[in-house]
Image (cartoon, grey):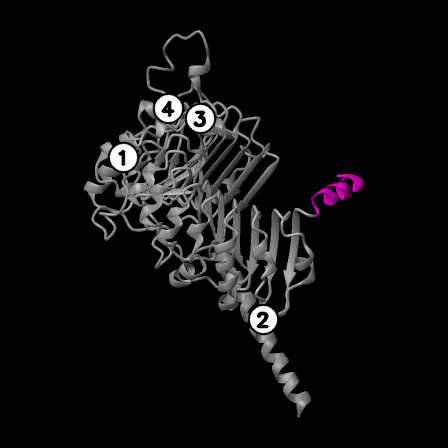
């Protein structure tokens, strides 16, 4: 913005907007001299010793307030917040943010929000570093946005959250919430929801927790959604009743069947045959939103990822697909007919031993059937980036259908941690579009291309790196040399000091 226009805008708003930093026990003159009757928007930064700030309570027409405070000085903050909640009842937007790394416990969160229910006109509330919210927050019936930032102590929503029927955006730190309260299904105006958590039916929150079918009426959701704990679904009908296919404004979806074990920071071990069958049935019953551009499936414990015709019909616009930590899955899912897929990442599918024509998604009769178009004979028509990582039992990768065009636009191929993989398909290596080949921690492949690089010599960017026994031997020698040098240096310094 031009300086003159900027200065003019400040001149017009100087009586309506103010930003004040408070240090010491005296109330700053800038705040005292501000015309309280005309003040509409205020940013207030409180230091360690916050004064009483009497003058701010006269700004009864204040519409938005951003308040930064130092968390260790919570006792000095409470009178300020009490006055705000009692006097500034016309507030539409309120942001309360601690400026320290300390986080509030649940009782401290109750203290700072004591009286917040008086702000009956509040539309926007943002808090950070807080614990579980008190029930009184559910009295803010006009609230449209609730945002909780950097709050690792936040585990549960209040049970009365269903009262906030005007809520549009519910934003919070992911992977911390223990369950969704039952009344969440009443928030039919929601546009943004960070994640939906399916708690175990036999857990301690079973009677209080909302099932997956609680998503049934939340059809205005847009942007991104994560569904966590999908493997806890007790009845496959819950999946169908969630009606994900009606969430037409969702473009990114994350489906996590099992959570990472936070105690050991790794994914849980394989599950029973019964639960594996349940995961497969859940996957088959899913009907994704029709406009998805990005999809991630993690923690799946079935032996085969059952993708029904509903899946293929719904993923016409899908550009990015990530399949993570599916250690019991033995067969690569048939993804070749996804018409818009550009990026594919498959990681830690450790039971797969072979990848072949089954991954193309083209039935045996398809390539032989007459067609007016060659589209049916193309697998992965728009795929540009392909990455496999951690497929530890994978040995063979071969496509036998010679009349099928495979990945005609492939640009980058990356293979990491696939120790037993013997070779790469000729159809990919001969592609004129392949510009980057990365191979890391794939011992057999490295030995293969050491002997014969003729099939990959035309690729402009080749990175093959294997940290085998020789690497560790070299590192051991370097460490030994460094220790020897340190001993020499210590002896030398000892002689000098003497």
Q: Are marks 3 and 2 in contact (CB under 8 Å)?
A: no
Closer to the chain start, of discs 4 and 2, is 4
Q: Position of residue 450 (x, y in %)?
A: 52, 43
189 sits to left or right of 300: right
The quarter of the rendered structure image containing the N terminus is: top right
Marks 3 and 1 sit apart, C-alpha to C-alpha, by: 21 Å
Marks 3 and 4 sit apart, C-alpha to C-alpha, by: 12 Å
Kindly identify which residue carries mark 1.
282
Kindly identify which residue carries mark 2.
482
Q: Quadrant of residue 442?
A: top left
Closer to the chain start, of discs 3 and 2, is 3
Dot 1 falls on a residue whose secondary structure is helix
- The answer to whether any part of residue 236 appears in the image is yes
Q: Which numbered disc covers residue 312?
A: 4
Closer to the chain start, of discs 3 and 4, is 3
Closer to the chain start, of discs 1 and 4, is 1
Q: Which numbered disc covers residue 389?
A: none
Dot 4 falls on a residue whose secondary structure is helix
Kindly identify which residue carries mark 3.
291
Q: Are marks 4 and 2 in contact (CB under 8 Å)?
A: no
Q: Residue at x 27, y 34 (%)?
A: 282
**Which residue, as the protein is rendered here, is positioned at the far bottom?**
498
* Residues drawn in magenta: 1-14
Q: Are marks 1 and 2 in contact (CB under 8 Å)?
A: no
**Vertical order, 332 against 54 (above or below):** above
Closer to the chain start, of discs 3 and 1, is 1
Q: Position of residue 146 (x, y in %)?
A: 45, 45
The quarter of the rendered structure image containing the C terminus is: bottom right
Given this view, does label 3 or label 4 mark the residue nearer the observer? 3
Given this view, does label 1 or label 2 mark the residue nearer the observer? 1
- The answer to whether any part of residue 357 appears in the image is no
Q: Residues within 10 Å of mark 1 (few under 14, many from 20)?
A: many
């Amino acid at each position: 913005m031009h300086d003159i226009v900027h200065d003019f805008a400040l001149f017009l708003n100087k009586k309506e907007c103010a930003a004040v930093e408070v240090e010491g026990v005296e109330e700053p003159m800038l705040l005292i001299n501000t015309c309280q009757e005309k003040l509409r928007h205020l940013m207030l930064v409180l230091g360690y010793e916050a004064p009483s700030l009497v003058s701010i309570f006269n700004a009864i027409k204040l519409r938005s307030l951003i308040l930064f405070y130092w968390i260790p000085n919570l006792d000095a903050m409470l009178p300020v917040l009490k006055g705000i909640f009692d006097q500034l009842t016309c507030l539409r937007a309120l942001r309360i943010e601690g400026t320290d790394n300390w986080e509030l416990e649940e009782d401290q969160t109750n203290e700072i929000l004591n009286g917040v229910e008086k702000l009956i006109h509040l539309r926007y509330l943002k808090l950070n570093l807080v614990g579980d919210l008190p029930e009184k927050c559910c009295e803010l019936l006009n609230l449209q946005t609730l945002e909780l930032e950097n709050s690792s102590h936040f585990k549960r929503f209040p049970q009365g959250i269903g009262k906030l029927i005007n809520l549009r955006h519910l934003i919070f730190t992911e992977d911390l919430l223990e369950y969704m309260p039952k009344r969440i299904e009443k928030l039919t105006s929601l546009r943004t929801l960070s994640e939906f958590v399916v708690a175990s039916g036999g857990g301690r929150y079973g009677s209080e927790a909302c099932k997956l079918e609680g998503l049934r009426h939340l059809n205005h959701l847009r942007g991104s959604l994560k569904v966590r704990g999908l493997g806890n679904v007790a009845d496959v009908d819950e999946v169908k009743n969630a009606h994900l296919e009606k969430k037409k404004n969702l473009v990114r979806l994350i489906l996590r069947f099992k959570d990472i074990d936070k105690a050991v920071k790794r994914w849980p071990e394989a599950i029973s045959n019964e639960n594996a069958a349940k995961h497969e049935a859940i996957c088959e019953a899913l009907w994704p939103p029709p406009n998805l551009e990005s999809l991630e499936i993690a923690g799946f414990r079935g032996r085969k990822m059952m993708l029904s015709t509903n899946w293929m019909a719904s993923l016409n616009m899908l550009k990015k697909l990530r399949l993570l930590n599916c250690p019991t899955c033995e067969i690569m899912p048939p993804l070749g007919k996804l018409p818009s897929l550009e990026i594919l990442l498959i990681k830690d599918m450790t039971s797969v031993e072979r990848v072949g024509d089954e991954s193309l998604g083209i039935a045996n009769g398809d390539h032989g059937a007459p067609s007016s178009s060659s589209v049916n004979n193309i697998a992965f028509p728009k795929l540009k980036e392909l990455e496999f990582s951690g497929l530890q039992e994978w040995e063979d990768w071969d496509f036998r259908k010679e009349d099928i065009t495979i990945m005609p636009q492939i640009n980058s191929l990356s293979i990491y941690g696939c120790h037993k993989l013997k070779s790469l398909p000729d159809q990919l290596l001969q592609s004129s579009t392949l510009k980057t080949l990365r191979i890391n921690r794939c011992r057999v492949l490295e030995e293969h291309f050491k002997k014969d690089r003729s099939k990959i010599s035309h690729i402009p960017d080749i990175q093959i790196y294997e940290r085998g026994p020789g690497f560790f031997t070299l590192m051991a020698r370097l460490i030994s040399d460094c220790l020897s040098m340190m001993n020499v240096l210590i002896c030398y310094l000892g002689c000098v000091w003497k």
